[in-house]
Image (cartoon, rainbow, N blue to C red):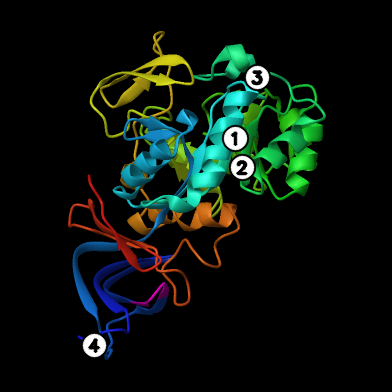
């Protein structure tokens, strides 16, 4: 071992962007990946890591409300730290702190807390804010609190951009609501990814939203008009329009495994993005939890409201990868890509993250032979995990 070089060598099965290397090597120096490929000899190695299972790129979750007993809407640095530390144990190296429908003062508190404390997260990095609601359709609200649902006003684009201070990365809204198309135009021009969700929109209304700048669909098939042979609705339009990337909650509850297989066959490469939609009960005992002022029961792997409807999920992103590989009948590397390179591209971060390639950031994880996350590195630094 030579001190000071920071070179680490990882040996094992390597998940590539378009395949898997059975006997592979990843070499990092400092914060960057130096080499990915077949085994070679390198001098001045500080650490060698022999992996029993796989070496994955770090995962990115575009839609997660909470974990470890905390929620983004708690609006405290402690809550963000707890979420960050819980997610990293499941291979997540970056995530969007996702809000729920709430009044403006509490949304401001949650957003400002994220802006002010994102850089101090010790686990998974906080990449920005995903604002889910309050500009959604009451009939498709799901587990969003109806008390706070509103239609957007002309000043709302400036309000949310000012509060987020450049950290608003994604917003979910219903494009059929009054004022929504104008909001889509304003936000998309500022580089915000605008997503159709919690919406009763028709095919034509979704297409109008796309023309206005929408380019994404929130947790497809959930909280939206479904596919009908005479009216494709949000779901059908999202499947057919390659300009739209779509989120999938791959737990087998939110979307039937057969439909997951159909989605994997329908959407182009990087058009299908795995998310967790996790809430504060992730990693916690079964029982009752709060989600945006609504009472949620966590039991049997599902989070539900009192009427039995689904309310977020108890899914972790590493489990979503394995589920999707099994349900869709796709190789592991392709499912990993849906949770790494695909979300990185969606956020415009793919030149630096999302895959194991020389020159990119050393964000990676290792698993055991059963696919369980064992160790995680962010910017080449190992992050302690507590599963």
Magenta stretch secondary structure, dominant: strand
Tell me the magenta residue range: 28-32
**Marks 3 and 2, how far apart at CA:** 18 Å
Q: Mark 2 or mark 4: name the one nearer the start of the chain.
A: 4
Give the mark count: 4
Looking at the image, is mark 3 or mark 1 earlier in the sequence?
A: 1
Q: Are marks 3 and 2 in contact (CB under 8 Å)?
A: no
Q: What residue sits right under mark 3 in the picture?
A: 137
The residue positioned 56% from the left and 45% from the top of the image is: 115
Q: Are marks 1 and 2 in contact (CB under 8 Å)?
A: yes
Give how far across and how far down residue 339 sits, in percent: 43, 51
Residue 243 location, x and y as percent? 67, 47
Q: Which quadrant of the figure has residue 317?
A: top left
Q: Is residue 225 left or right of residue 85?
A: right
Examine the rendered structure and indicate whether residue 93 appears above or below residue 142: below
Q: Secondary structure beneath disc 1?
A: strand
The mark closer to the camera, 4 or 3, is 4
Report the residue at 24% width, 81% height from top.
46
Q: Residues within 10 Å of mark 4 (few under 14, many from 20)?
A: few
């Amino acid at each position: 071992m030579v001190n000071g070089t920071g070179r680490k060598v990882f040996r094992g099965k390597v998940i590539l962007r378009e395949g898997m290397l059975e006997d592979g090597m990843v070499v990092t120096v400092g914060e960057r990946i130096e080499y990915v490929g077949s085994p070679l000899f390198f001098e001045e190695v500080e650490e060698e890591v022999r992996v029993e299972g796989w070496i994955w790129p770090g995962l990115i979750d575009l839609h997660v409300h909470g974990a470890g007993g905390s929620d983004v809407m708690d609006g405290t640095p402690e809550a963000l730290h707890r979420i960050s530390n819980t997610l990293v144990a499941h291979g997540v190296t970056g995530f969007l702190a996702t809000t729920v429908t709430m009044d403006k003062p509490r949304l401001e508190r949650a957003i400002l807390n994220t802006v002010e404390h994102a850089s101090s997260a010790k686990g998974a990095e906080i990449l920005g804010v995903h604002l889910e609601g309050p500009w959604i359709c009451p009939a498709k609200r799901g587990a969003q609190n109806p008390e706070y649902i509103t239609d957007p006003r002309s000043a709302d684009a400036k309000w949310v951009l000012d509060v987020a201070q450049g950290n608003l990365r994604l917003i979910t809204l219903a494009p059929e609501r009054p004022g929504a198309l104008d909001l889509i135009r304003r936000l998309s021009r500022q580089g915000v990814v605008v997503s159709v969700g919690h919406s009763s929109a028709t095919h034509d209304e979704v297409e109008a939203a796309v023309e206005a700048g929408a380019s994404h669909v929130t947790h497809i098939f959930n909280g939206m008009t479904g596919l009908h042979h005479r009216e494709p609705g949000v779901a059908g339009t999202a499947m057919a329009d390659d300009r739209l990337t779509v989120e999938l909650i791959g737990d087998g509850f939110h979307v039937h495994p057969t439909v997951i297989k159909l989605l994997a066959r329908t959407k182009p490469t990087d058009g299908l993005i795995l998310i967790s939609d996790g809430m504060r009960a992730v990693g916690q005992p079964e029982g009752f939890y709060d989600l945006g002022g609504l009472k949620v029961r966590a039991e049997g792997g599902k989070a539900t409201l009192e009427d039995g409807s689904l309310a977020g999920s108890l899914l972790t992103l590493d489990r979503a990868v394995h589920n999707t590989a099994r349900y869709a009948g796709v190789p592991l590397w392709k499912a990993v890509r849906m949770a790494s390179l695909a979300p990185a591209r969606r956020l415009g971060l793919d030149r630096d993250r999302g895959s194991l390639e020389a020159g990119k950031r050393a964000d990676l994880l290792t698993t055991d032979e059963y696919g369980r996350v064992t160790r995680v590195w962010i910017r080449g630094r190992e992050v302690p995990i507590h599963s």
